[in-house]
Amino acid sequence: DAKTTQPPSMDCAEGRAANLPCNHSTISGNEYVYWYRQIHSQGPQYIIHGLKNNETNEMASLIITEDRKSSTLILPHATLRDTAVYYCIVRVHSNSGYALNFGKGTSLLVTP
Amino acid sequence: GAGVSQSPSNKVTEKGKDVELRCDPISGHTALYWYRQRLGQGLEFLIYFQGNSAPDKSGLPSDRFSAERTGESVSTLTIQRTQQEDSAVYLCASSLSVGLFYEQYFGPGTRLTVT
């Protein structure tokens, strides 16, 4: 699986958009970009995933660059409850199961 | 509906003792995963089960670690002769099936402290 690089921490004011970057310069053509987050003392929670097109759901938007070497997770109106560690991973689609191996992610602090 | 549950929520044990951690997946989920998360670190895959297939044990760190699952229900992770480096939060996740597009739902974890 391709390696990802994320900033260790970021701050965001409540109500503003939080833009979390992720570099995955060695991503291969059949690898998807996934985002999870982990609120303190809870298990990780799936947010969104994509291959090459931008994706949006009720939680966030995912913007993937045309060369697919980086992506940005956007929380359009951050709230205090979005304070969490955000993990970006890339993974090939497999029918034999997949293991999530997260790095340290980005610790996002949303401030009042 | 009910999510993934794990027990105990906290476990303190002495070095050298065996511990058993339990996971109850979401009903109907055929895939079950165990992970370990050391303090301030990311997630480390341990093992996964899918239906009646042989489990993928590729992430187990040593032969002191083992896991069982009864059908498509409860799973137990056993750590024998615990060491201090085993201290971590052990997370269980289940998904409807295997494959990249099946979201994994995580339990709250069991915090294991080996003294």
Image: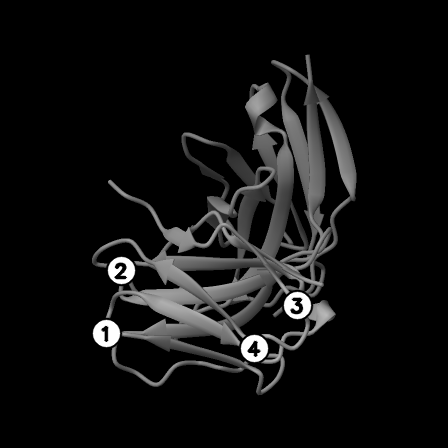
Q: Earlier in the sequence, mark 2 or mark 1?
A: 2
Q: How far separated are the C-alphas under marks 2 and 1?
A: 11 Å
Q: Name the residue: 59% across, 32% down.
A: A74
Q: Are marks 1 and 3 in contact (CB under 8 Å)?
A: no
- The reply to whether residue B25 is in sight is yes
Specify the amino acid type for callout 4.
Answer: Gly
Going by the numbered disc 1, the residue's amino acid type is Gly
Element type at mark 2 = loop
What residue would you read off at disc 2?
A: B29
Q: Earlier in the sequence, mark 4 or mark 3?
A: 3
Secondary structure under the numbered disc 1 in the rendered image: loop
Q: Badge 2: how crowded within 10 Å, few (<14), some, or many (20+)?
A: some
A4 or B86, nearer to the observer: B86
Sequence-earlier tag: 3 or 2: 3
Residue A70, relative to residue B43: is it above or below? above
Chain for numbered disc 4: B
